[in-house]
Amino acid sequence: MTKLHENKNMQLLFGLLMGIVFGFLLHKGGVSKYDIILAQLRLTDFTVLKIMLSAVIITMLGISYLYPKGRVKLQVKPGSIKNSIVGGLIFGVGFATLGYCPGTIAAAVGNGYLDGLIGGMIGIIIGSGIYASFYSDLKKKKLITEDRFSGRSLFDSFKGHPFRYTLPFSAILVLVMIVAEIAGL
Amino acid sequence: MRVFSMVQWSPYVVGILIGALNLVAMLLSDKVLGASTSYAKASGMVRNILDKEYVKKNEFYLQNAINIDWGFMLVVGIIIGAFISAGLSNDFNLVLVPPMWANEISNSFFVRFIIAVFGGIVLGIGSRWAGGCTSGHGISGTSQLSILSWVASIFFFIGGIITAFLIYGL
């Protein structure tokens, strides 16, 4: 597997192919559409959350099976609780204003949304560039930090086989979706 | 295959398949699904054309290589995949202003364009500040049981829900 992971051209092809599948699924899920994303944020339709939670359950249970066998490596992002809260809120403002997120906007472009292509995508690139310009200052002023949660996964903190905690946790997430269904959302 | 020409599938089916795709990415590519980093790379590529010296010295671009990698191809693939799905289900339409926005706010493309650029800028800053987006944190990080990803994802929605109500009212 390591050999395959290091094969650059093959990985570029895999990225493209997996992206095609991802984009296909995002469109089939309806989240390539502004109206469905905003309906989630206005709490009238829970399609976005249902897709996300179902995906989380499957990936989490898959990792629970594969990780103890050493078949997959975890890819946990660095940062801090503070970054997650402040950055998360800024992201949220942009998410609702634009009506797409960085992944779904690519699907929206494939679906024909021109406000996504010539508005949003350019905006995200500019915004990322602005962040890059201020990155050193943000770090110096400790506005962005790293704390003890940086790059950490609870898979490495909890003892015992992962299924012992991921199965009950999955049940809770399923319950959240059942509640959304019963509420007719 | 009639299933491919359906405009919309059950969100649970879509979610399960995205979850499985994420596992395939981990196994075959040692990667997880995530989109926002590619926009940061794109910003570096554009600036590399405008001012090479700046990019060479910028701490962010030094830490985050500007190259076309797996994640960049993933975003390119998303556009193609959505286009294929939309085409198969006769759902590809060129839309200037999304219907909800046109009905409740304004049907001017200029207004929508300005707001979309502004929203995109804020989204770009926020995704880098938080270190990921709805896929990188919201699906991949949360499923790897990263506390930071759970907190970020919850705040994506807190910020998003408040802003959506400010835009559209209660």
Image: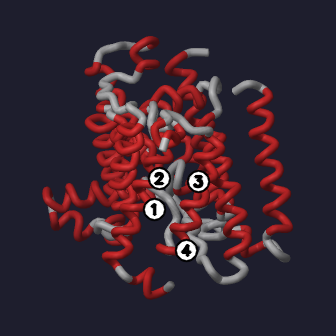
Asked whether, in this view, residue B52 is left or right of residue A161, the answer is left
Residue A139's disc is 1
**Residue A137 visible in the displayed image:** no
Instruction: Determine whether the residue tagged by mark 2 lies in a helix, strand or loop.
Output: helix
Q: CA distance from mark 1 to mark 3?
A: 38 Å
Residue B156 in the image: state x and y as whole percent.
57, 42
Task: Determine crowd level at label 4: few under 14, some 14-19, many 20+ residues with C-alpha closer than 10 A.
Answer: some
Q: CA distance from mark 2 to mark 4?
A: 16 Å
Q: Which of the two labelled residues, at mark 3 and mark 4, occupies the earlier sequence position?
A: 3
Residue B83's disc is none
The chain to which mark 4 is attached is: B
Up-down: is A167 above or below A98?
Answer: below
Q: Nearer the viewer, mark 1 or mark 4?
A: 4
User: Foreground: B114 or B88?
Assistant: B88
Residue B151 in the image: state x and y as whole percent.
65, 51
Q: Quadrant of residue B137?
A: bottom right
Q: CA distance from mark 2 to mark 3?
A: 9 Å
According to the image, label 2 marks what residue? Answer: A22
Task: Determine crowd level at label 2: few under 14, some 14-19, many 20+ residues with C-alpha closer than 10 A.
Answer: many
Q: Which of the two labelled residues, at mark 2 and mark 1, occupies the earlier sequence position?
A: 2
- Give the amino acid type for the residue marked by disc 3 in the picture: Leu
According to the image, label 4 marks what residue? Answer: B27
The chain to which mark 2 is attached is: A
According to the image, label 3 marks what residue? Answer: B17
- Give the amino acid type for the residue marked by disc 4 in the picture: Leu
Measuring 54% from the left and 67% from the top, which residue is drawn there? Answer: B24
